[in-house]
Every structure is written in C-alpha cells, then in structure tokens.
Image (cartoon, helix red, strand yellow):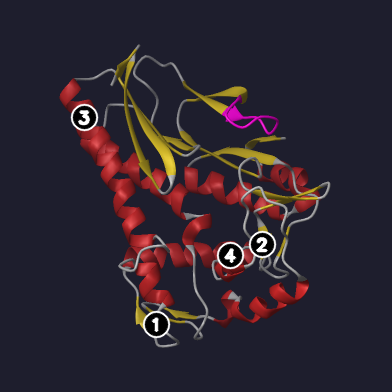
Amino acid sequence: MQCEGYWMGRFVAMACPCEVLIEQTSEACARSIASAVAECAWRIERKFSRYRNDSVVHAINAANGCPIEIDEETAKLLDFAAALHSLSDGRFDITSGALRRVWKFDGSSRIPTQNEIDTLLPLIGWHKVRWERPSLRMPAGMEIDFGGIGKEYAVDAAVELARTIAPDVSCLVNFGGDVAVGHERSNGKPWRVGVETVKRAGTAAGLIELHRGGLATSGDTRRFVLHGSHRYSHILDARTGWPVRDAPRSVTVAANTCTQAGSLTTLAMLEGAGAREFLRRSGLKYWIQ
C-alpha cells in the first residue's frame, strides 16, 4: 500500500497486528521488503511458538527429561534468557510458563489460590536446567517459553533482513507495538511512533520521533486481572508466581535494538516501585505511565 511519503505492508503474526513502513522507493523494492519482513516473522513464529507441535519449543518441552541438541539460533536465545535471569535475580525466567495454567490475564476477576501456585513452583527455575552448548536437559514436566523475548528478537531480525535486501532504504518494523528502525531516512526526517496511553487502549499518550534503533513497551493495558479494586499485571515474578507489586502501568524504552529495549522494559517492570530508578541508571530514554 502506498501512503503519503512511504509504502506500508500489513500482516498478522505472533497473535498481533504487524506492519512495515518503507520510505519512498520502487514498488518492486517495497514489495520485496514487505514480503521478506512478513516471512521472517512467520518463520520465527513457526520455530519458537509454544502452541505448535512442530516448533523447537515443543521439542524441548516434550523431551521428558532427556537431553536435546539445540541449533545456534535457539542457543543464542537461551543464552540471552539466561543473562536476563541473572540480571533480574531470578525474577525473569523462561521456565515460568507453567504459571499460565492458573493465571489467565483476560481482564477477568479470577486469581489463583496460593496452593495452586505452590503446586507449580517446583516446575519453575532456570537453575534446574542443564545448558551446555549444544545440549539442553530439563527435568521432566518443566517447559520453556520465549514469549518474553521472542517478538523483540523477531523485530530486530526482520530489520536486518530488510537491510540486506535494500541497504539504502529506511524501514520501520512494528510487531504489535515493538518497533525498530535500521537507519535514518534519506530525507533526514524521523519515523513517528505513538505510545499507547494506559487510560484507553488504542489511543496514544504521545508521539516519539525515531531515527534509528528500537522501541518497546511493557504494561498491563491489554493483559491483566481485575480483582476487587486491585489490578494485577501479567508480568510475574518467577520466584513467587505472583504479579510484581507496585509496578508501573506501562514502561516504554528506546535503545539501540528492539531486543535491548524490550529486555529493559521487562526488567524495569520486575523492579516494581524501583522501576524509575532502574531506568534512570540505564542512561537510556524511557517513559513511564
């Protein structure tokens, strides 16, 4: 689709609306970029989705305590997840997916009992996993979930792919609000990105001008439980099985890559009331609601 001053391609992947904006170039070039970005998103979804029985994640989770050999791309994600686990003192943990069995962040009012959570906690803990490249062994019954880092990784991968197709053409890749720009537009103008307000889903609290780099947001605007007067965020502390207390409603970070921005938004949310101080120490631009 041609818009005023740029091309736009839209598709759905990873259960969210996705788009790629491409500065003025030939229609053939724009179509090539848009197709490549969409295929990149679909490839990563096929490979890492926990909902598919032909994905790498399914193979890992179905190993039933046996070692499984891991390919290089998956290994890099495991290494990154391990680093985030360490940086968060265990609050971020890709083995915490078991908690989905009792937490349903669908806007309803139901919260699990402590007994329900306690039953699942023995199935959580990266320290229980034996990861020695290229071999991974998890105790039977445990599972991993790349949901906390996968979409941001896909954004950066799509941006890099677009740059190999047309190195001189600036593109903005947006997968469900996680955004990255490979390099500055030829006219020097920034791409303008709206930050969703926590007051009303689908409306912008403001606009951010992005010349290059990544932008990501974490928050409870769309995924939450409302129990009485208390709103529970979908971001869980893997050590306790409960949502983080006193976390901001929303955190947005601008960084060199979408993956870096996304990891910092999540780590900030896991800091709870200390989110602002954590982000201040990072030295990056951030917005808190």
Q: Is residue 31 above or below residue 279?
A: above
The label nearer to you, 4 versus 2, is 4
Residue hosting label 2: 88
Q: Is residue 42 above or below residue 202?
A: below
The mark nearer the N terminus, 1 or 4, is 1
Q: Amino acid at mark 3?
A: Arg
Secondary structure beneath label 2: loop
CA–CA distance between discs 3 and 1?
Answer: 40 Å
Q: CA distance from mark 1 to mark 4?
A: 20 Å
- Quick one: which residue is furthest to the bottom in this view? 66
> SS at mark 4?
helix
Residue 52 pos. (x, y %) = 36, 64
The answer for how far apart the CA atoms under marks 4 and 2 are is 20 Å
Q: Which residues lie in the magenta part? A: 195-203
Residue matched to label 3: 31
- Residue type for callout 4: Arg
In the rendering, which numbered label is found on residue 100?
A: 4
Residue 20: x %, y % from top left: 35, 31
Residue 202 shown in magenta: yes
Return the disc, 1 or 2, that comes first in the chain's sequence: 1
